[in-house]
Image (cartoon, helix red, strand yellow):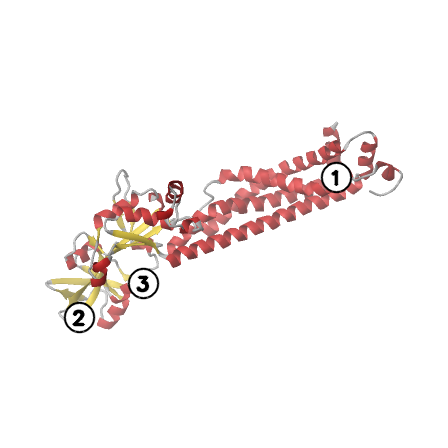
């Protein structure tokens, strides 16, 4: 009997049913897509922000008298590989070591010199493929005119230094007994603009500091900072510390890097880390608000259509009540219609959401949704929520129908 009533209802109001299904489908597609993207957006946006520079710096730990006296200390190059052995090793997207010093060139100019990796294959324990890292991944905005030095007798000239000393590609400079060829100029907007820049091992040999580095810039994929992330780990209970340590905060990753760099101390670059957190929070809030408004609009569309349908079916509902149908049966009819509408609209919405998330992912982030299967439960849940919310007002009105009044020719 219930199925006959529902079937007759749908056949007698085809346009209304199509409109309700479309409302549910569009609302589901938008809300499911936004919800799925919000679950994935932290990782994607964090990866995008990593193209704008490192968010952690590792430097030698200098304290007490050594700090007051300005004692120069160095990190060990051999510890670099350990950065890819920490708990959050897969979140380390890139690292670039730097060695800084000063040299006399052409027996008269005292200039800074900086050694680093540009695109360096680093062999990792237990891995077949090397980890390609360096300033090309950590600082992709570096602008090199010419080519990166590849030989032991080649260096780049910072753009300001090149302008001051009239250096260009092919120029020769001498430091001590060694002659170097300038392979081009480099512009970074930082200290490299006023220095000679070369491959790390070249500068280590030039300064007599083999195996030493001054600092390491690390680009790590992190979880946005919240109140818990700012807690002092020294004052945490064991359970709290374990949770903090095993969450990808920039602070916990810095702590783990400090543990593997002997004599070093890793610390977040706070302007970068805090800006990333603010961007992610605002994007998430925007997505949730858009989802809420879309959900309400879709439910309102369903509700309006069902109310109009109810007005045409007032006599039918009144007759059912007069024949003995109780409130529960009336509610069951509308909820059954809402369920069928939700499943139909949710299925269409799921298909639409797959296209929407794929398009947004490719156009905005250059990659698709990491977990597209999550759209299935989200779409079905959102579709049912829209349908049920949309049926609440019609159900309320249907319950209030008075058979005696309606059957005598009165209104609802």
> Which corner quadrant holds the N terminus?
top right
Reading the image, the residue beneath label 3 is: 188
Instruction: Give the image location of residue 319, x and y in percent.
Output: 83, 33
For label 1, the residue is: 13
Give residue 70's mark: none
Q: Residues within 10 Å of mark 2 (few under 14, many from 20)?
A: few
Q: How many marks?
A: 3
Q: Is residue 79 above or below residue 101?
A: above
Q: Quadrant of residue 404?
A: top right
Q: Disc 3 on helix, strand or loop?
A: loop
Q: Earlier in the sequence, mark 3 or mark 1?
A: 1
Is residue 351 left or right of 124 when viewed as pictured? right
Instruction: Say whether marks 1 and 2 touch (CB < 8 Å).
Output: no
| Disc 1 from disc 2: Cα separation | 89 Å
* x then y, percent, for residue 227: 45, 51
Q: In the rendered image, which residue does mark 2 sit on? A: 109
Q: Is the residue under label 2 in contact with that under label 3 (CB below 8 Å)?
A: no
The residues tagged by marks 3 and 2 sit, at their Cα atoms, a distance apart of 22 Å
Q: Secondary structure at mark 2?
A: strand
First reached walking from the N terminus: tag 3 or tag 2: 2
- Are the residues at dot 3 and dot 1 in contact (C-beta closer than 8 Å)? no
Question: Could you say where residue 73 lies in the image, as x and y percent from the top left?
Answer: 20, 56
Observer-side mark, 1 or 2, equals 2
Left or right of 238 on screen, residue 330: right
Nearer the camera: disc 3 or disc 1: 3
């Amino acid at each position: 009997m219930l199925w006959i009533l529902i079937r007759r209802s749908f056949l007698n109001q085809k346009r209304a049913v199509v409109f309700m299904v479309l409302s549910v489908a569009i609302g589901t597609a938008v809300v499911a897509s936004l919800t799925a993207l919000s679950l994935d957006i932290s990782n994607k946006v964090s990866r995008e922000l990593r193209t704008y520079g490192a968010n952690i710096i590792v430097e030698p730990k200098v304290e007490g008298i050594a700090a007051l006296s300005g004692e120069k200390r160095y990190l060990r190059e051999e510890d670099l590989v350990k950065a890819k052995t920490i708990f959050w090793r897969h979140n380390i997207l890139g690292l670039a070591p730097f060695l800084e010093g000063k040299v006399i060139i052409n027996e008269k100019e005292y200039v800074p010199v900086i050694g680093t990796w540009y695109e360096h294959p680093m062999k990792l324990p237990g891995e077949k493929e090397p980890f390609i890292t360096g300033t090309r991944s950590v600082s992709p905005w570096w602008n090199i005119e010419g080519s990166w030095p590849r030989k032991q007798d080649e260096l780049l000239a910072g753009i300001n230094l090149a302008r001051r000393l009239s250096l260009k590609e092919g120029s020769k400079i001498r430091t001590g007994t060694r002659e170097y060829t300038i392979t081009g100029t480099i512009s970074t907007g930082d200290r490299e603009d006023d220095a000679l820049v070369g491959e790390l091992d070249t500068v280590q040999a030039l300064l007599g500091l083999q195996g030493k580095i001054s600092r390491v810039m690390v680009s790590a994929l992190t979880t946005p900072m919240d109140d818990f992330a700012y807690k002092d780990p020294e004052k945490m209970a064991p359970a709290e510390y374990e949770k903090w340590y095993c969450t990808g905060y920039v602070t916990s990753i810095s702590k783990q890097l400090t543990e593997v760099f002997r004599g070093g101390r890793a610390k977040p670059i706070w302007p970068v880390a805090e800006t990333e957190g603010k961007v992610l929070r605002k994007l998430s809030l925007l997505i949730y608000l858009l989802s809420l408004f879309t959900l309400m609009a879709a439910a309102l569309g369903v509700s309006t259509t069902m109310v109009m349908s109810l007005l045409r079916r007032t006599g039918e509902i009144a007759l059912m009540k007069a024949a003995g149908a109780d409130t529960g049966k009336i509610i069951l009819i509308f909820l059954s219609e809402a369920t069928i509408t939700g499943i139909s609209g949710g299925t269409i919405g799921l298909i639409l959401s797959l296209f929407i998330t794929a398009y947004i992912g490719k156009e905005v982030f250059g990659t698709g949704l990491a977990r597209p299967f999550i759209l299935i439960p989200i779409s079905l849940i959102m579709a049912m929520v829209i349908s049920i919310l949309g049926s609440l007002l019609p159900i309320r009105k249907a319950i209030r129908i008075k058979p005696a009044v309606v059957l005598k020719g009165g209104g609802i």
